[in-house]
Image: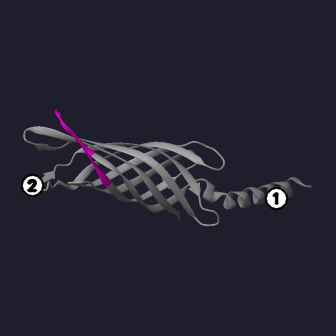
Amino acid sequence: MKLNSTVILATAVILSAGAANANLLFDIYAGGTIGVGATAKITDDHFYDHSATAYGAVFGIDIPMFRIEGEYNYLNGHDTTMNLAMVNAYFKVPTPVLKPYFGAGLGTTFESKYDPEFGPHINMDKSITYQGMVGITLDVPIAPIKLDIEGRILYANNAYEIANDMVDILHYDARAKLRYIF
């Protein structure tokens, strides 16, 4: 085989393999989350813990070992509602079937309030929030869908002040996240 023919054949093979595997470089996704857990309010003297639910939406990019996403969360606790905007980064452990991961997030609260049964409600100022996640990803066969089952813990520092005491919020839950891969 002449050199020209070999180069043309090698180029065609590389281009066709590259086109077939182009989607392996990264995936863009959008999805929703639902979770159940508890929200705790922490002061210098007290620790209040009540059940809570969480709902959210995500949009992100999934590359072979990492995942980065923007996330909106709505947390609804006993007397506290929180809207959160988060940026999350995940490290994926490379395994064949079940794909474990862990991650961390940073964000802020907005339009959140503490609304007790008795007494005035308090609008929460924007406070910095941190979260940690650990979970497992399951690929749905034949569909461009992934299901994440995860546990997470979120901490909001100095969320609001009541009776000259700053209140921190600790939220922990178990979540299911359904992601559609574009």
- The reply, left or right, for residue 158 in relation to residue 178 is left
Q: Could you tell me residue 83's position as x and y percent?
A: 27, 56
Chain part drawn in magenta: 40-52
Residue 155 disc label: none
Tag 1: amino acid:
Leu
Quadrant including the N terminus: bottom right
- Dot 2 lies on which element? loop
- The reply, left or right, for residue 174 in relation to residue 21 is left
Rendered residue at 71%/59% (across/down): 15
Rendered residue at 29%/53% (across/down): 84
Residue 118 disc label: 2
- Name the residue nearer the viewer: 13 or 179: 179
For the residues bearing labels 2 and 1, Cβ distance under 8 angstroms:
no
Reply yes or no: does residue 50 show up in magenta.
Answer: yes
- Name the residue nearer the viewer: 19 or 148: 148
Prevailing SS of the magenta stretch: strand
Disc 2 to disc 1, C-alpha distance: 78 Å
Mark 2 or 1: in front is 2
Q: Earlier in the sequence, mark 2 or mark 1?
A: 1
- Name the residue nearer the viewer: 89 or 116: 116
- Dot 1 lies on which element? helix
Rendered residue at 34%/56% (across/down): 54
According to the image, what is the colour scheme of the structure? Answer: one colour
**Residue located farthest toward the top when viewing the structure as drawn:** 44
- Name the residue nearer the viewer: 136 or 58: 136
Q: Could you tell me residue 113's position as x and y percent?
A: 18, 54
Question: Count the marks: how many?
Answer: 2
Tag 2: amino acid:
Phe
Q: In the displayed structure, would residue 46 be above or below residue 171?
A: above
Residue 164 occupies quadrant = top left
- The reply, left or right, for residue 138 in relation to residue 131 is right
Residue marked by disc 1 = 9
